[in-house]
Image (spheres, helix red, strand yellow):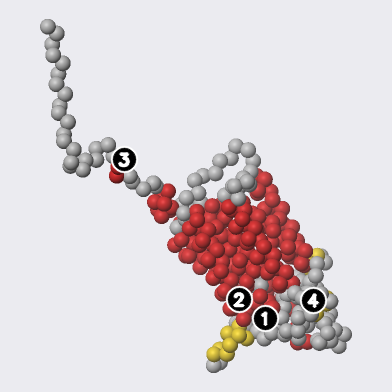
Amino acid sequence: MIPITPTSIAIQLGPLPVYWYGICYAVGLALAYVVMSSEARRRGFDIELLANGMIVVAIAALVGGRAYHVIDQWALYKDDLLKIVLPPYSGLGVFGGLVTGVIAAVLYARFKGVPFWPWADVVAPGLFAMQAIGRWGNFFNQELYGPPTSLPWGIQIDCAHRLVEFPCETYPLATTGFHPLFLYESVAGLLGMLFLLWLARSSRIRLRHGDLLLVFFIWYPIVRFLLETLRTDNWKVGGIPTAQLVSVIFVLIAFLVVLYRHRSGVVDPDPLLGPSAAKAREPEPDPFADDDWDDGDDEPEPDPQPDAPPA
């Protein structure tokens, strides 16, 4: 067991507390931008589109993620609705953020007049990067943990943050560790990011534009489906965790889209976008390739004489 019970506040600036949760997601966004911008440059895409688009998508994802979390944990907010919009924030629902984020990304791509699927491949590894770092915010809030475990990486949870199923009287603080579900998601996100970056560079696998995002929509829901079996505080419908139902829907849709887009006879459009990409695609002019180029040193050739008439 790891004997650490963190505090949610990173630093106190007078009356204003700065929370680790927000710091983790800010760092996650920064890492996501680094990963996405690197992929965009490698593909010759316009970085300015990425920077502006991330702001739009991040805001949309924040709204959707917060809405999903509030519905999930409605018992925490029903008696104090201001807690929904006022800090400290205790969580974001990933699936809600993904839905609103994708909708915003599609609309932004249409507004800018660029195809969505090639850019989706740029974004997908960054989503995993965001997940890998952002989930550590749950660690500092002492949330997103599973049942007690004797594994050496089990984490302590303060009595005040315990679920009713795990009171300190039954599970003493000093000797009880819990499954760190946030850590499992973080590691899965890191591995997913590395896998997508490798897949994007592999010459052995035939990919279509957008396949990396579709892999994300298969990978993450599978991980989430498995981890939901270790949670007891999840939102349920008919006794089944809602996140598992949503995970199955995401996986089925993504898998069917992959099959549809890989059907025979379909050709990808040119992925290069925007003026910067078009410029990157044009070869550099070669001044020596011009047959009319003249350095002024050669003597002009004499005009050919007409053939002499036959005698």
Q: Which residue is mark 2?
A: 24
Badge 4 or badge 3: first in the primary sequence: 4
Quick check: 170 left or right of 261?
Answer: right
Query: Residue 246 location, x and y as percent?
Result: 72, 61
* Mark found first going from the N terminus, 1 or 2: 2
Residue at 73 percent of width and 84 percent of height = 4
Q: Give the number of the mark in front: 1 or 4.
A: 4
**Tag 4: Cα neighbours inside 10 Å, few (<14), some, or many (≥20)?**
few
Q: Nearer the viewer, residue 292 or 5?
A: 292
**Hey, which quadrant is residue 79 in on the image?**
bottom right
Amino acid under disc 3: Ala
Element on which disc 4 rests: loop
Between label 4 and label 2, give the one nearer the viewer.
4
Callout 3 crowding tier (Cα within 10 Å): few <14, some 14–19, many ≥20? few
In what element is the residue under mark 1? helix
The number of callouts visible is 4
Quick one: label 1 or label 4, which is nearer the N terminus?
1
Of badges 1 and 3, nearer the viewer stands: 3
Residue for point 69% across, 84% down: 6
Residue at 60% across / 64% down in the picture? 127
Residue to which mark 4 is pinned = 152
N-terminal label among 3 and 2: 2
Distance CA(mark 1)–CA(mark 2): 9 Å
Label whose residue precedes the other's in the sequence (1 or 3): 1
Residue 289 is labelled as 3
In the image, taking residue 25 as reference, residue 159 lies left or right, namely: right
Which type of secondary structure does the marked residue at label 3 adopt?
helix
